Image (spheres, grey):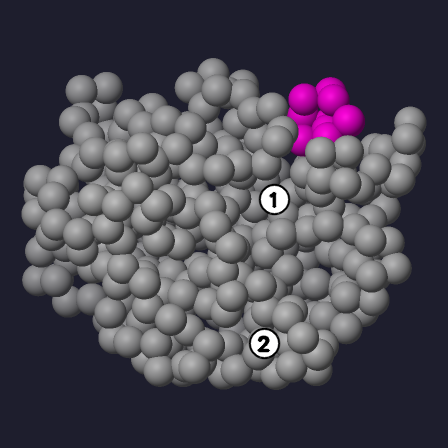
């Protein structure tokens, strides 16, 4: 899929000039702005640049194929997210597939949104409608709209996990098309059925992935503490949690889903985004190299280990393929302190989040 210059100009004009409701319910409005990340465009862009700049991540050889990132508020996970995207160049990818868990309601199976674009304070991200329609042919993927006249909304309306990643991708890649896939509980019934479900979703994604597609999977690792019903380490929480996380990260990098499940069953550990990780491991080829480029915990960040969530950024690269060609003309415009927001927040849009204290997005270090 290649963007013509005319298409780029049209998309840029839409993203920068269109009123908030020009596409009505076909636009997915921000649900996490002002809670997970700053809602002011200039402050948001500056925050994203700061997290990317502060992140310490090596430049890996070859083409980046996929990555695993957290999806918590920027004050907690910003630098870990930034590490995954630090070395991206403008226009290197035409399409981004984001596979993420639901954060606001339970979901059986998977869902794609029936919208034309996702909005963030930095602009609109157009949906790759052809790819989404292909995915919708899968028996495991339902299509769900957004309805801002309804209090309950759908799985996409208030879901934060995809939205919080978009400003990083907008800032680094500029213009691209989005394929958002929310993957819920795939573990009901016989474990062999779960494995088949992962394979079915991976096969569906394989139909829309090419060399200029970046795959992003959102996941959190250990959920530790009484509030999550998992606190086996007492005063040794920091060491115990890190050991659990490193074992899980190692299984993901080796694409060993069976070993990951055995470890989770043995330790009774809790993690979110587990189904998406299995889909990723089924989707990727065995010759890719997995590398963890960042790791942190809310226990370390806040100094409070009674409850903690673990974050890791993992990159999967093809060392035998060159990095994709960049397209600087797709760059996002630099915001100024006077830049107006082109979108409004979704009504009553505060997303649900885990019970861990988060710094205010405007006061991050």
**Can residue 135 be seen?**
yes
Q: Identify the residue shown where x is 82% and y is 61%.
A: 265
Residue 347 occupies quadrant:
top left
Question: In what quadrant of the picture does the N terminus appear?
Answer: bottom left
Q: Identify the residue shown where x is 54% and y is 21%.
A: 359
Q: Residues within 10 Å of mark 1 (few under 14, many from 20)?
A: some
Q: Identify the residue shown where x is 58% and y is 30%.
A: 76
Percent position (x, y) of residue 124?
22, 48
Percent position (x, y) of residue 251?
76, 64
Does residue 131 lie above or below 214 as drawn?
below
Q: CA distance from mark 2 to mark 1?
A: 30 Å
Q: Nearer the viewer, residue 140 or 175?
A: 140
Dot 2 corresponds to which residue?
198
Contact (Cβ within 8 Å) of mark 2 with mark 1? no
Dot 1 corresponds to which residue?
57
Does residue 175 lie above or below 239 as drawn?
below
Q: Secondary structure at mark 2?
A: helix
Q: Nearer the viewer, residue 182 or 359?
A: 182
Percent position (x, y) of residue 323?
46, 65
Residue 195 is a magenta residue: no
Q: Secondary structure at mark 1?
A: loop
Q: Which residues are magenta?
A: 298-307
**Can residue 61 be seen?**
no
Question: In what quadrant of the picture does the C terminus appear?
Answer: top right
In this rendering, which labeled residue sits more in front, label 2 or label 1?
2
Q: Identify the residue shown where x is 14% and y is 54%.
A: 11
Say whether residue 177 is left or right of residue 265. Answer: left
């Amino acid at each position: 899929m290649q963007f013509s210059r005319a298409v780029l100009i049209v998309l840029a004009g839409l993203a920068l000039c269109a009123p908030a409701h020009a596409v009505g319910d076909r636009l997915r409005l921000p649900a996490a702005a002002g809670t997970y990340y700053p809602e002011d465009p200039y402050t948001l862009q500056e925050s994203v640049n700061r997290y990317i700049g502060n992140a310490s991540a090596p430049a890996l050889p070859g083409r980046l194929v996929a990555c695993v990132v957290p999806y918590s508020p920027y004050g907690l996970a910003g630098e870990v997210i930034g590490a995954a995207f630090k070395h991206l160049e403008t226009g290197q990818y035409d399409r981004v597939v984001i596979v993420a868990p639901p954060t606001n309601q339970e979901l059986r199976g998977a869902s794609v949104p029936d919208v034309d674009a996702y909005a963030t304070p930095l602009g609109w991200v157009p949906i790759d409608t052809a790819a989404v329609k292909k995915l919708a042919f899968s028996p495991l993927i339902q299509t769900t709209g957004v309805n801002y006249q309804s209090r309950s909304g759908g799985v996409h309306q208030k879901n934060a996990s995809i939205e919080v990643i978009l400003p990083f991708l907008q800032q680094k890649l500029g213009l691209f098309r989005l394929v958002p896939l929310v993957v819920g509980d795939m573990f009901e019934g016989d474990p062999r059925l779960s494995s088949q479900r992962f394979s079915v979703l991976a096969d569906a994604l394989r139909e829309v992935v090419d060399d200029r597609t970046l795959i992003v999977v959102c996941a959190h690792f250990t959920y530790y503490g009484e509030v999550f019903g998992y606190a086996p380490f007492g005063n040794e929480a920091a060491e115990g949690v890190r050991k659990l996380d490193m074992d899980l990260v190692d299984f993901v990098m080796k694409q060993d889903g069976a070993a990951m499940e055995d470890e989770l069953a043995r330790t009774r550990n809790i993690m979110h985004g587990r189904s998406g990780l299995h889909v990723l491991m089924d989707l990727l080829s065995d010759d890719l190299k997995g590398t963890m480029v960042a790791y942190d915990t809310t226990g370390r960040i806040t100094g409070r280990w009674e409850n903690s969530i673990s974050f890791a950024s993992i990159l999967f690269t093809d060392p035998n393929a060159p990095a994709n060609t960049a397209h600087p003309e797709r760059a996002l415009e630099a915001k100024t302190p006077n830049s107006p927001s082109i979108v409004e927040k979704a009504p009553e849009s505060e997303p649900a989040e885990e019970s861990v204290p988060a710094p205010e997005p405007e006061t991050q270090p």
